[in-house]
Amino acid sequence: MKEKTKRTIAFYSMISPWFVVFIIFGLYPMLYGLYLSFTNYYGFNIKHLKWMGLQNYHKAFTDSDAMYSLGRTLYVTAFNVPLSVAIGLGLALLLNRQVRGVSVYRTIFYLPSIVPALASVIMWKVIFSSNNGILNGILSTVGLPEVNWLGYDYATTSLLIMLLWGAGGGVLINLAGLKGIPRDLYEAASIDGATPIKRTIYLTLPLMTPVIFFNVIMGIIGSLQIYMQPILLNGTELLARPIQPNYLYFVHAFQQIFAFQRFAYGMALLWILFLAILALSVVVFTTSKYWVHYETDQE
């Protein structure tokens, strides 16, 4: 047996456990859910399904709640992704400096990303509370009027603040990217008279664009699937409808499936969300050739 054939067999043998699990628990449920989205499935009629064609998808695009929630989700994503990427990169630039106790600071900024989502929401509800809340207490101390952070006008602002609190989760990835930039380039730029600001703008940022590109893609995927935070921020039950400005798309799909047993319609909503994520990812991938720079030429 040729050496290349042996390596090929070894490769597929090693990935086969993951591949089998992916087919059984990933690919098959996805395709079966796609099939059910074209039927009248409501949870108890699996043996008497009726083919509905594109009716569920047509209903999704004519459902005012679905379109409103999709718009709110895109609105939150438009603010959350750029700000979280910028904050994560900014923190990484600060934490990449050799100062005393830098490991402690890195731990502090990364800590919010490992705190359970439920605990984070409970903490922020206490901070945003109109009844002796911490944030309103600070505003009163400095002579500013109190704000109803969980009310209609500021609900989305509160949600964005809570989401950006976990922006430090991207610090480790950004730090890894910063550590991968050769120090020789900085030394050469210093010799040429480049100031620290110019080295950051013309050297660090271009070489960090592959990492920024990865963070943007992951941020889009995560932001379009936000579910627990808006519900628990304004309520106490997972099936409760959040305040209208925080009524996001994934919340709408979840409620259609589990609160109203509209399983086929809910799966159609989820497949529309999948296509939206795919479309935005394609746009980012297509435009990346204009702003993502690599140290070597990429074919």
Image: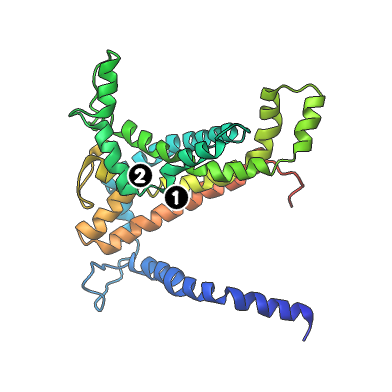
Assign a secondary structure to mark 2. helix
**Residue beneath label 1, please?**
276
Disc 2 residue crowd, few under 14, some 14–19, many 20+, Cα 10 Å? many
- Disc 2 residue type (three-letter): Leu
Is 240 situated left or right of 157 in this image?
left
Is 145 situated above or below 54? above
Q: Residue at left 33%, top 68%?
A: 36
> Can see residue 175?
yes
Q: Residue at left 41%, top 47%?
A: 224
Is 192 situated above or below 58? above
Is 147 situated left or right of 285 in this image?
left
**Residue beneath label 2, please?**
70
Is 204 situated left or right of 135 in this image?
right
Q: Quadrant of residue 141?
A: top left
The x, y position of residue 74, in whole percent, is 40, 40
Mark 2 / mark 1, whichever is N-terminal: 2
Q: Residue at left 28%, top 15%?
A: 144
Assign a secondary structure to mark 1. helix
Marks 2 and 1, how far apart at CA: 10 Å
Disc 1 residue crowd, few under 14, some 14–19, many 20+, Cα 10 Å? some
Is 122 situated above or below 143? below
Is 159 situated above or below 219? above
The x, y position of residue 79, in whole percent, is 43, 34
The x, y position of residue 291, in whole percent, is 65, 38
| The N terminus - image quarter | bottom right
Q: Quadrant of residue 246?
A: top left
The x, y position of residue 96, in whole percent, is 61, 36
